[in-house]
Image (cartoon, rainbow, N blue to C red):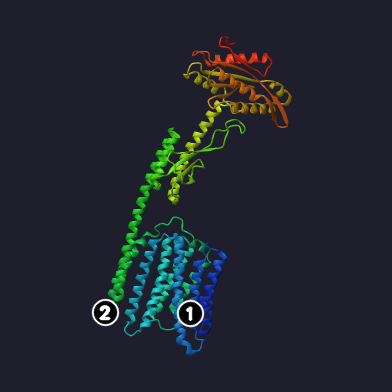
């Protein structure tokens, strides 16, 4: 589309100057202008930019210029000439700024609205160019013989051309220099500015279509703006430029110098040509000086913002590094969480901010005792009424709570996410350690304590000081007929029966007691701080709790157990001796008919 349009438009423009017939050449010119309007619309439809608004505004602006030329054609009644001139000039003065509005829209899209510097640069260009054009026309023709309306018209034409040039400069500086379409629009504005100068050099006399340099320059401007719409890169002009930077630094520095130089030059031109004072140029001097001051103030603010951001990034990186070091050095999880919360309070300015860990318990059998859902571990001081959100980067393991709603800017969100990554690694390591510890101390089938944890619990219980007549008791439990169940129904049913027995035992004991799987179908219950009567009552409860049918799949199995109970004899008894006495009592229970409780007497020697 791009190559086809440019070729056809160039051919039409050349033909316009070569055809000797004025009537035919004006038809060609109208076709050329309206063809450009259509090309912009087609470009927006074919390439489908993210935002088509700037292109439609540009098309409408060019369409008004084309319509202004059409109403000035000599084919209309001669007595309407004055009215047509007024209408044509009005359409031109509306259309030209609209093209500038479209270009400014492109620049704003390129910069994402963060283009204070280019805006000020474009104002400098606009005022400086308008001043030069105004004073140039004044020097050539003088203003004494011109009517007020003529002066306004010339000033409006100067300002309109300068406006388009300023907006295209803004576009290039904001990021348009990356795209071919951006340079085509900029070149179009340069050609249009040159055409306006050529038109003003004639004193604004005659119709819009005057032939010669004016038509050639405006024709090139029209061709280039339509070519920008036809080029595939036109879609990039309505997208934010990646990483707005100081494009063309020399231009950024030279523009203020150029702006400051133009008003004195205009004043000098007025003085040399007429000897008169220059109100417009003097006023422009003041305005341009003020804008230049604003421009440099903007540069200073930008530099300070950059320094502040650099310092802020350094502080954040240092805080993040310290957190990471503490996490790697094995700092306790609660201490690390509080340190991270302190850092985030400072960065986010939220004094009540707290962090809480969403703990995940170690893996346990789904139907084993002691299983349960994940739980949250709030940090002390968590607000009772608070907003809460998953801490970015923590993989759902840490939550942030505060009384205020948290809204994170992009750079802050990145830092908070980094803190979340550090905490997630620490929490995951803590969970892994807890799970490893759990697996090392618990039976994988039933979830009960294993022999290692059982030995530790017996030693702890024996080591406690208690009142007279109270001590530690151990119940040694063996399921009756379990081998027959395994042999008849298989080990899968046997495992289900063991898990059911484990649940029943866990339901019969106190919180201070420990239930363990000793081996195979043997279980041990450690009864802490009991006397003889209480120990016997708890053992009878265990015996009764195991007695009764158990549903395993489609089967209903009868369960009973033989229990041997041994009570602590004296302070010198060790865990192994206590277990051997309870084991011996359990075997005597089986010998006497099973499904019974047998208490090991203190004077009975442990069996080997």
Q: Secondary structure at mark 2?
A: loop
Mark 2 burial class by Cα count in 10 Å: few <14, some 14-19, many 20+: few
Residue named by callout 2: 276
Residue 429 image offset from top left, x and y in percent: 49, 34
Q: What residue is shown at x 35% (from left), y 76% (from top)?
A: 134
Q: Is residue 43 visible?
A: yes
Whether tag 2 and tag 1 are in contact, CB under 8 A, the answer is: no
* Placement of 442 over or under 205, stated as above or below: above
Pick the residue in front: 84 or 596: 596
* Placement of 66 over or under 312, stated as above or below: below
Pick the residue in front: 139 or 3: 139
Residue named by callout 1: 68
Residue 399 image offset from top left, x and y in percent: 48, 43
Pick the residue in front: 105 or 600: 600
Q: Is residue 427 left or right of residue 554?
A: left
Q: What residue is shown at x 31% (from left), y 71% (from top)?
A: 284
Q: CA distance from mark 2 to mark 1?
A: 36 Å
Pick the residue in front: 40 or 446: 446
Q: Point out the tag, 2 or 1, that comes first from the N-terminus.
A: 1
Res. 496 mark: none
**Viewport quadrant of the C terminus:** top right
Q: Quadrant of residue 494?
A: top right
Mark 1 burial class by Cα count in 10 Å: few <14, some 14-19, many 20+: many
Q: Secondary structure at mark 1?
A: helix
């Amino acid at each position: 589309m791009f190559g086809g349009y440019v070729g056809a438009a160039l051919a039409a423009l050349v033909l316009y100057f070569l055809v000797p017939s004025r009537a035919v050449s004006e038809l060609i010119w109208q076709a050329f202008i309206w063809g450009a309007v259509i090309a912009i619309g087609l470009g927006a439809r074919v390439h489908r930019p993210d935002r088509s608004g700037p292109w439609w505004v540009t098309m409408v602006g060019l369409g008004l210029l084309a319509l202004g030329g059409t109403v000035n054609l000599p084919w209309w009644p001669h007595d309407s000439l004055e009215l047509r001139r007024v209408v044509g000039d009005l359409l031109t003065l509306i259309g030209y700024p609209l093209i500038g509005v479209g270009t400014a829209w492109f620049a704003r899209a390129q910069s994402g609205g963060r283009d204070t510097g280019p805006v000020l640069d474009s104002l400098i260009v606009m005022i400086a160019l308008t001043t030069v054009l105004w004073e140039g026309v004044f020097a050539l023709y003088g203003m004494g013989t011109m009517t007020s309306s003529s002066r306004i018209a010339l000033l409006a034409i100067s300002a309109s051309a300068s406006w388009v040039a300023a907006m295209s400069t803004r576009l290039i500086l904001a990021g348009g220099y990356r795209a071919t379409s951006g340079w085509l629009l900029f070149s179009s504005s340069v050609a249009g500015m040159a055409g306006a100068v050529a038109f003003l050099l004639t004193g604004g006399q005659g119709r819009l279509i005057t032939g010669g340099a004016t038509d050639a320059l405006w024709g090139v401007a029209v061709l280039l703006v339509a070519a920008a719409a036809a080029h595939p890169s036109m879609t990039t002009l309505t997208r934010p430029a990646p990483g707005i930077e100081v494009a063309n630094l020399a231009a950024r520095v030279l523009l203020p110098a150029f702006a400051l130089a133009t008003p004195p030059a205009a004043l000098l031109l007025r003085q040399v040509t007429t000897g008169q004072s220059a109100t417009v140029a003097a006023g422009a001097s003041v305005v341009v000086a003020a804008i230049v001051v604003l421009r440099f103030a903007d540069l200073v603010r930008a530099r300070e913002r950059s320094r502040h951001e650099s310092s802020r990034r350094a502080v954040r990186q240092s805080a993040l590094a310290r957190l990471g070091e503490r996490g790697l050095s094995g700092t306790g999880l609660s201490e690390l969480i509080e340190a991270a919360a302190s850092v985030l309070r400072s960065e986010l300015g939220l004094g009540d901010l707290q962090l809480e860990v969403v703990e995940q318990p170690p893996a346990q059998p789904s139907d084993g005792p002691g299983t349960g859902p994940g739980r949250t571990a709030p940090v002390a001081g968590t607000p009772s009424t608070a907003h809460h959100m998953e801490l970015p980067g923590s993989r759902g393991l840490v939550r942030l709570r505060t009384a205020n709603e948290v809204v994170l800017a992009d750079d802050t969100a990145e830092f908070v996410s980094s803190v979340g990554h550090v905490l997630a690694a620490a929490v995951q390591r803590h969970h892994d350690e807890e799970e490893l510890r759990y697996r090392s101390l618990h039976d994988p089938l039933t979830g009960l304590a294993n022999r290692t944890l059982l030995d530790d619990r017996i030693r702890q219980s024996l080591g406690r000081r208690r009142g007279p007549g109270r001590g530690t008791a151990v119940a040694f439990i063996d399921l009756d007929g379990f081998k027959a169940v395994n042999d008849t129904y298989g080990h899968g049913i046997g495992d289900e029966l063991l898990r059911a027995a484990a649940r029943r035992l866990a339901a019969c004991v106190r919180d201070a007691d420990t239930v363990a799987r000793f081996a195979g179908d043997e279980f041990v219950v450690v009864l802490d701080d009991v006397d003889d009567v209480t120990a016997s009552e708890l053992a009878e409860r265990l015996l009764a709790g195991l007695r009764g049918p158990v549903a395993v799949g489609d089967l209903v199995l009868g369960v009973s157990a033989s229990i041997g109970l041994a009570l602590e004899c004296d302070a010198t008894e060790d865990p192994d001796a206590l277990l051997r006495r309870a084991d011996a009592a359990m075997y005597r229970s089986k010998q006497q008919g099973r499904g019974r409780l047998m208490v090991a007497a203190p004077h009975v020697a442990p069996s080997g």
